[in-house]
């Protein structure tokens, strides 16, 4: 039987209360929402918080909505909310692509967007999707809010910019006219972590790429993205040749490790091929050719 | 710590360690052993029950996280000696062999049919994709759900009204 070590339990009923509890208990406290990463880690003693602070009641953060020219996703929005959100799909179909292959429907009922990206697992799909779309994370403490660009949010495996006494409260994604996005993943079986995955976001103006994001999951890409691929895309036409060059750059820029999901060469091949497929679909969507 | 929740329509209060997993609370503290305990890693889905109307894997919920919430377990499917159509469907279509995955399967599929009374085979397979059955190859599980969809018993509708 796998059981967590003894732990205290607190329930927060507002963001302010959650932050006050984080300040009171210090670095040995962990926020818990869906719990589908933290509880298994507690069972294995990979995480040993002295207290868990339950934020499932923070419905004030359970939203996916448009505000001005941004898509805003609250930290306690469940995976299912993002998967089924019409407004997220309208502007960023990449999130539906990714959510459909994250875990399974039961886990998606519980797991939260904020929990996933704060877990910062190197194979986490939303981290690659947010890297591709250039998201901005909103981190709150008793001193106020600060905005952290996605590229500065992840500090390596399982480590983020969220400090003691702070919590991630929102993810913001700028809404860009002429933008298309897509996510492609290869997994061993339904609901598994990716062997490799790639997300792409392209903004087109009169056939020219004016903005590009390429995100990669599970292949040890720095900050879940390939700047090398992005720089090869911006400023020219959306052609198959340029996508292929960018995909090759994405494959070359990552640094996968061999494990039970596959050898290095296979994962690197997937990083390139999935980047290529994601770029094609993103471009087709930007041009209105595919829903 | 003291935890109070509603389980199958009854309020229960118990003193528990916060680290106690909901699946063990339901089985070992309340004695409701219909909910099975399987992989312990939220992969197999045999521990699925409903929390506030949504299927969840109870091996990955701490008992105090269920405090104040409403739990429904597989024991609540049968009413007054009448099986729920989903239970009858598993009988009619041999949706089980060893039966280990069945409680979780039925709770997930009851929820599916409550929200989508006529799912396609593909939708049924997606709905149970977080649950593992090593006997049936899933084919008979899909048939069982289809049987239940085709036989929405009147009594079930009456139960729904009572519950509402």
Image (cartoon, rainbow, N blue to C red):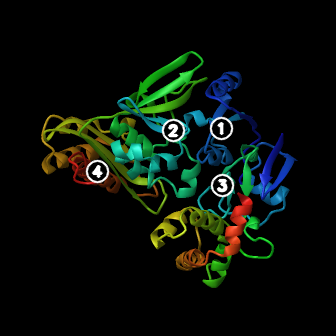
The residue that label 2 is drawn on is: A63
Q: Name the mark nearer the viewer: 2 or 4.
A: 2
Q: Is residue A92 visible?
A: no
| Quarter of the image with the C terminus of chain B in it | bottom right
Mark 2 touches mark 3? (CB < 8 Å): no
The residue that label 3 is drawn on is: B53
> Which residue is painted at 73% across and 51% down in the image?
B70
- Where is A177 relative to B78, above or below? above
Mark 2 touches mark 4? (CB < 8 Å): no
The residue that label 1 is drawn on is: A57
Badge 2: few (under 14), some or many (20 or more) residues near its Cα, within 10 Å? some
The residue that label 4 is drawn on is: A278
Residue B158: name its quadrant: bottom right
Indicate the chain on which mark 3 is placed.
B
For the residues labelled 2 and 4, the Cα–Cα distance comes to 27 Å
- Spot occupied by residue A42 in the image (x, y as percentages of width and height): 66, 44
Earlier along the polypeptide chain: callout 2 or callout 4?
2
């Amino acid at each position: 039987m796998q059981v967590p070590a003894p732990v205290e339990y607190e329930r927060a009923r507002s963001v302010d209360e959650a932050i006050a509890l984080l300040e009171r208990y210090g670095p040995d406290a962990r926020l818990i929402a869906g719990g589908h990463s933290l509880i298994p880690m507690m069972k294995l003693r990979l995480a040993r918080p002295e207290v868990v602070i339950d934020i499932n009641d923070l419905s004030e953060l359970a939203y996916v909505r448009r505000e001005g020219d941004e898509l805003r996703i609250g930290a306690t929005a469940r995976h299912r909310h993002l998967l089924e959100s019409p407004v997220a799909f309208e502007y960023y179909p990449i999130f539906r692509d990714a959510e459909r292959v994250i875990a399974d429907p039961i886990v998606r009922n519980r797991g939260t967007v904020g929990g996933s990206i704060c877990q910062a697992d190197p194979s986490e799909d939303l981290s690659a999707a947010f890297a591709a779309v250039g998201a901005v994370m909103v981190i709150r403490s008793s001193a106020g809010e600060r905005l952290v660009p996605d590229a500065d949010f992840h500090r390596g495996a399982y480590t983020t910019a969220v400090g003691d006494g702070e919590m991630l409260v929102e993810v913001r994604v700028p809404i860009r006219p002429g933008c298309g996005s897509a996510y492609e993943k290869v997994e061993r079986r339904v609901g598994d972590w990716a062997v490799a995955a790639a997300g792409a976001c392209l903004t087109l103006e009169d056939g020219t790429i004016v903005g590009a994001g390429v995100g990669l999951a599970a292949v040890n890409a720095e900050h879940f993205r390939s700047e090398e691929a992005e720089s090869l895309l911006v400023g020219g036409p959306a052609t198959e040749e340029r996508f292929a060059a960018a995909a090759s750059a994405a494959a070359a820029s990552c640094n996968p490790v061999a494990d039970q999901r596959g050898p290095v060469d296979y994962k690197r091949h997937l990083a390139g091929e999935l980047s290529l497929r994601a770029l094609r679909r993103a471009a087709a969507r930007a041009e209105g050719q595919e829903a | 710590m003291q935890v109070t929740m509603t389980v199958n329509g009854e309020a229960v209060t118990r003193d528990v360690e916060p680290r106690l997993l909901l699946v063990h609370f339901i089985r070992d503290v309340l004695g409701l052993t219909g909910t099975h305990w399987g992989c312990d890693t939220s992969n197999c889905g045999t521990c699925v029950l409903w929390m506030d109307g949504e299927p969840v894997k109870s091996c990955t919920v701490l008992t105090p996280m269920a405090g104040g919430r409403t739990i429904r377990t597989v024991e609540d499917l049968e009413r007054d000696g009448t099986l729920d159509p989903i239970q009858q469907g598993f009988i009619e279509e041999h949706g089980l062999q060893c039966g280990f995955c069945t409680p979780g399967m039925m709770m997930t599929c009851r929820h599916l049919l409550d929200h989508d009374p006529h799912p396609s085979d593909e939708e049924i397979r997606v709905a149970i994709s977080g649950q593992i059955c090593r006997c049936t190859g899933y084919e008979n599980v899909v048939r069982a759900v289809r049987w239940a969809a085709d036989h929405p018993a009147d009594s079930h509708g009456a139960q729904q009204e009572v519950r509402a």
